[in-house]
């Protein structure tokens, strides 16, 4: 297990992740606040206060899972899935709710049938997952026709600086992705309305699965 994955499995990180680690590191990496990321997530996933079924993949301590659930009504429900037991324990303690549930699993082989969810997201995790392309394909598989998908992950420029940062990041087990990987993958899978925004070292990509 590499350094990045070991860190994600550490109880000490789970304890400080939501209120200290994420706000600080994501602000440095993207210039954006957690509040902006949360509001954009609701917009990108088109959470509309109806009975949507949502999957928050690699949910960590449930810091987006619970927020998304607050925008649902009726039988709307958000499932948070993560691999780390300490993160899930923290999620259950801090981010439980009427429309939230947590599942332990591996993003690369999701325990859900095709088309289970109306919206699927994965924020701040694809650069940690050993096979991020398999995980993204799984997200698309479990998304229902007409549904929305949104990811936030790392970004590298296509220049010498990008190459240098890619090498530096890989030493700790983090991957940096170029501008094309996810939009191309989404397009090849038949997704439409593909939108990509880059903020410093982070990229935000969302799309729709045709109805
Ligand atoms: C940085 S946290 C992201 C938490 C939250 N989504 C956010 O944006 O703040 C990354 C999470 O990815 C999870 N993770 C890494 N590899 C995974 C895998 N193969 N399957 C499921 N979760 C995984 C880690 O356990 C960790 O909780």
Image (cartoon, rainbow, N blue to C red):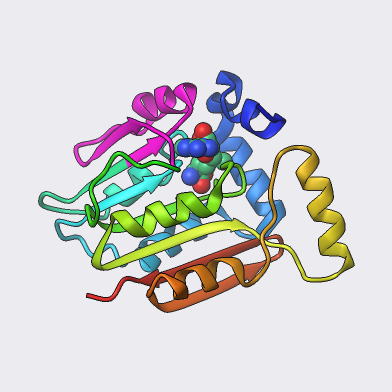
Quadrant that contains the C terminus = bottom left
Placement of 195 over or under 60, stated as above or below: below
Query: Is 81 or 132 nearer to us in this picture?
Result: 132
- Quick check: 45 left or right of 182? left
Q: Where is residue 133 in the image (x, y as percent from the top left)?
A: 53, 54
Residue at image position (40%, 71%) is 207
Residue 191 drawn at (x, y percent): 38, 74
The residue at 19%/57% (across/down) is: 52
Residue placed furthest toward the left:
74
| Residue 106 belongs to the span the image colors magenta | yes
Give 203 or 97, whichever is nearer the viewer: 203
Assess whether residue 199 is covered by the magenta stretch: no
Residue span colored magenta = 80-107
Image coordinates of residue 72 in percent, x first then y, are 21, 54
Residue 66: percent from the left, percent from the top?
A: 34, 42
**What residue is shown at x 39% (from left), y 67% (from top)?**
44
Q: Which residue is at the front of the view, 148 or 186?
A: 186
């Amino acid at each position: 297990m590499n350094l990045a994955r070991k860190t994600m499995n550490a109880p000490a990180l789970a304890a400080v992740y939501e209120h200290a680690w994420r706000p600080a590191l994501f602000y440095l990496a993207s210039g954006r606040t957690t509040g902006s990321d949360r509001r954009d997530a609701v917009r990108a996933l088109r959470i509309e206060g109806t009975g949507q079924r949502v999957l928050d993949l690699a949910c960590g301590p449930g810091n987006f899972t619970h927020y998304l659930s607050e925008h649902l009504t009726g039988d709307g429900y958000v499932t948070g899935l993560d691999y780390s037991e300490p993160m899930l324990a923290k999620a259950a303690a801090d981010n439980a709710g009427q429309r939230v549930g947590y599942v332990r699993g591996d993003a690369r082989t999701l325990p859900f049938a095709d088309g289970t969810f109306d919206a699927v997201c994965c924020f701040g995790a694809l650069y940690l997952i050993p096979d991020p392309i398999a995980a993204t394909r799984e997200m698309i598989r479990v998304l229902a026709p007409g549904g929305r998908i949104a990811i936030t992950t790392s970004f590298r420029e296509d220049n010498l600086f990008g190459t240098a940062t890619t090498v530096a990041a890989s030493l700790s087990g983090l991957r940096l992705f170029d501008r094309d990987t996810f939009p191309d993958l989404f397009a090849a899978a038949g997704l439409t309305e593909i939108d990509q925004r880059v903020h410093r070292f982070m990229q935000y990509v969302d799309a729709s699965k045709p109805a």
